[in-house]
Amino acid sequence: MEHRDENARRAAHAWGLKAETIAALWLRARLYTILDRNYRVKGGEIDIVARRGETIAFVEVKARGSLEDAAIAITPQKQRRISRAANRWLATHPWAASCAWRGDALLIAPGKLPRHLENAFELSVG
């Protein structure tokens, strides 16, 4: 049983990495510049930090069996973790203080085009 659980974890991790690559390519195709990927700090993480114009998007990538399941996977706890990491990222990138910031979601599901939700959740930054 442990072996099967480990295989499932590995498969889920590989699917997550593939989804993040798809998300980054999707954003680039929409003229975003990828500033950071897999940004991790104690108590928080951000999948992708991207910029288009004067807006910085802190993007949570969720890959599930359906786009709807992906959307509901961004819990309030996850939003707090993203906000903590966004605050740290902004503190280490002072030039970004003059930009607008938002919390976006990029939802990935097999057989579907990615869905980019701008302002999908509120960030507690500042």
Image (cartoon, grey):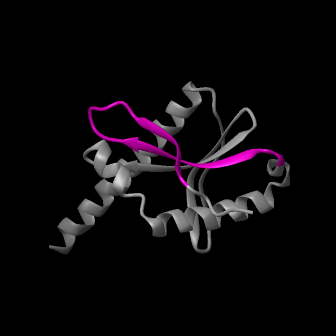
- What residue is rendered at 40% in x and 43% in y? 107
Q: Quadrant of the N terminus?
A: bottom left
User: In the image, is 106 to the left or to the right of 91?
Assistant: left
Q: Quadrant of the C terminus?
A: bottom right
- What residue is rendered at 79% in x and 62% in y? 91
Please name the predominant secondary structure of the magenta segment in the image.
Answer: strand
Q: Picture coordinates of residue 74 (x, y %)?
A: 42, 58
Residue 124, image quadrant: bottom right
Q: Picture coordinates of residue 72 (x, y %)?
A: 35, 55
In the rendered structure, does residue 104 fall within the stretch colored magenta? yes
In the rendered structure, does residue 85 fall within the stretch colored magenta? no
Give the residues drawn in magenta, as a range: 98-121
- What residue is rendered at 29% in x and 51% in y? 69
As rendered, which of 55 and 95 lies closer to the eye?
A: 55
- Check the image and report above or below for 39 versus 64: below
Q: Picture coordinates of residue 101 (x, y %)?
A: 68, 48
